[in-house]
Image (tube, helix red, strand yellow):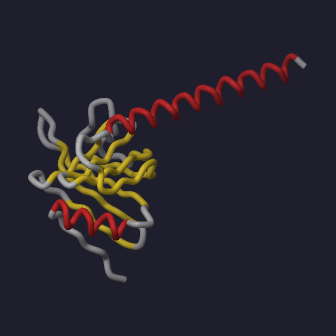
Amino acid sequence: MDYALSILFAFAVAATLGGLLKLSRKRAREKAATVDEEVLYEARSVPVRVMLDHDMLGGPAAGKINRADADLILTAKRIVVATHHGRVLEIRKDQGGSVRSTGPGRLVLEGVRMRPSGDSKVRIECHLPESEVWADKAAKILSTSRSALAG
């Protein structure tokens, strides 16, 4: 009986810690995705793959495919991608970058993250059912490139 109770207690502690970690990551992601402008389009808790050419301090590692949930925010001035690591990518009209739909439901965002020690290239891939809409809106608002692969 004591053995079963110990296992049950360990499971409850692990489940509680997992829930707290998930809640903490969600709050950090929402805080990083906060913008002062009117949000025109948003997607919350989207599974993404983040690739960088330089390590992000306290964030995703370079040279690896980093998986996370992200919030994507599109305003009249910029597009923001935020994970629990913070704001991973921000594409503005003056900064450049690209938002492309590379197939049905596939969205690829590429841009540069400004760093004191040099700029870092960022590529984000995600699956969104409305990827074409995101690419079109980004092209109109941000004057970014938009393309879809044929066939």
Q: Is residue 23 above or below residue 137?
A: above
Q: Residue at x 36, y 57 (%)?
A: 125
Q: Residue at x 39, y 38 (%)?
A: 29
- The answer to which quarter of the image holds residue 4 is top right
User: In front: 11, or 27?
Assistant: 27
Q: Is residue 56 above or below residue 42?
A: above
User: In front: 86, or 32?
Assistant: 32
Furthest residue toward right: 1
Q: How far across and down, in percent of the image, does residue 106 sit?
A: 39, 66
Q: Is residue 39 above or below residue 10?
A: below
**How many tags in the picture?**
0
Furthest residue toward front: 38
Q: Quadrant of the N terminus?
A: top right
Is residue 94 rendered to the left or right of residue 127? left
Q: Residue at x 70, y 26 (%)?
A: 12
Q: How far across and down, in percent of the image, does residue 32 sit?
A: 32, 37
Q: Quadrant of the C terminus?
A: bottom left
Is residue 118 rendered to the left or right of residue 66? left
Furthest residue toward top: 2
Furthest residue toward left: 94
Is residue 43 rendered to the left or right of residue 142? right
Q: How far across and down, in percent of the image, does residue 36 sit?
A: 24, 40
Q: How far across and down, in percent of the image, does residue 91 sit?
A: 20, 51
